[in-house]
Image (tube, rainbow, N blue to C red):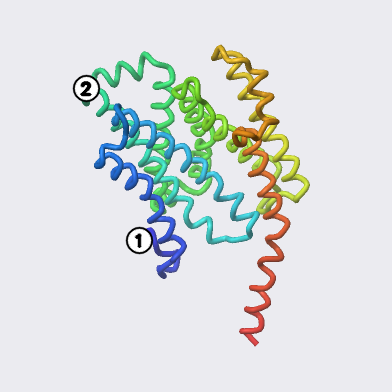
Amino acid sequence: MPWRDRTGAFSPFKATVFVALFVPALILAQSAGENALGPKPWQAATHDTGTWAIRLLLLSLLVTPARQVLRQARIAEVRRMVGVACFAYALLHLGLYAGDNAFDLVKVGSEIIKRIYLTIGFVALAGLAVLASTSTDAALRRMGGAAWRRLHWLVYPLAGLALVHFTLQSKADVTEPMLMAGLFAWLMGYRAIAPAGGAPGVLALVALAVAAAGFTAAVEFAWYALATGIDPWRVLAANLDVTFGLRPALWVGVTGAGAAVLRLVAPALRRPRATALAVRAD
């Protein structure tokens, strides 16, 4: 059962995550039932499920940094669950796109071949299908640990493809795609600087936050310069104006800074619990 830990005991943490993964789909279903998806409900639902697939994909990549920074090994127990949910939302995303085209599979197939952003998205979905189908303990035993890890390393390029698909289909408003790209850059940077089996130091995480924010601003600038008629310098300058909220680069920087703060305070948060356990043992 997905809500049980490795010993077979009920895990409130896993149960909470399991239920939470259904919430976006339930909200979408409620909105559809109330005719609250706007004039193009199929299209709105397609975009919503695709966005959640990307969010869950990045959330699955966040498991290792969260486990290491917070020093909470049990966080790793939900990685597989989140990854499979990501694939489920991506598959629903494709199904809703087919529904938007009256389930004309010939047309859907031709659109995937003709439109590069759909081709990229379909390749990412196919890769996620392979990873989801090999996410079981039985697959791990059958393939062996080394081969299994090599295969599942593909999640990183697949995430990159998914983000390209997300950006291209978003067209003019790429606020969330840029945010997701920046967070993905942070996640990749984290893996590059993290020591084996542990979290980077506070200063390294601060530097990573600055670098990821700068990368986000640069990618956003390049997008507006190359793909739209909007002045990229105005977009870049908007990062310094918080009147209407934070731009993606600033959100990435704040998130990265938050990780550094958690790295700093996590040992202190664990110490009282360790002391309490020691007293209880006495």
Relative to 248, residue 220 above or below:
above
User: How many residues crowd mark 2 within 10 Å: few (<14), some (14–19), many (20+)?
Assistant: few
- Quadrant (top left/top right/bottom left/bottom right) for the C terminus: bottom right
Circle 1 packing at 10 Å, graded few (<14), some (14-19), many (20+), is few
Which image quarter: residue 281?
bottom right
Residue at the spot 58% in from the left edge and 50% down from the top edge = 64
Mark 2–mark 1 Cα distance, whole angstroms, equals: 37 Å
In percent of width and height, residue 155 lies at: 50, 37
Is disc 2 placed on a helix, strand or loop?
loop
- Rendered location of residue 184, percent (x, y): 58, 36
- Residue under circle 1? 1
Residue 170 position, x and y percent, is: 46, 24
Q: Nearer the viewer, residue 33 or 128?
A: 33
When asked about the image quadrant of residue 229, the answer is top right
Tell me what residue is drawn at x 59 percent, y 18 percent: 224
Residue at the bottom extreme, as displayed: 282
- Mark 2 sits on what residue? 104
- Which residue is rendered at x = 43% and y = 30% of the image? 124
Q: Secondary structure at mark 1?
A: loop
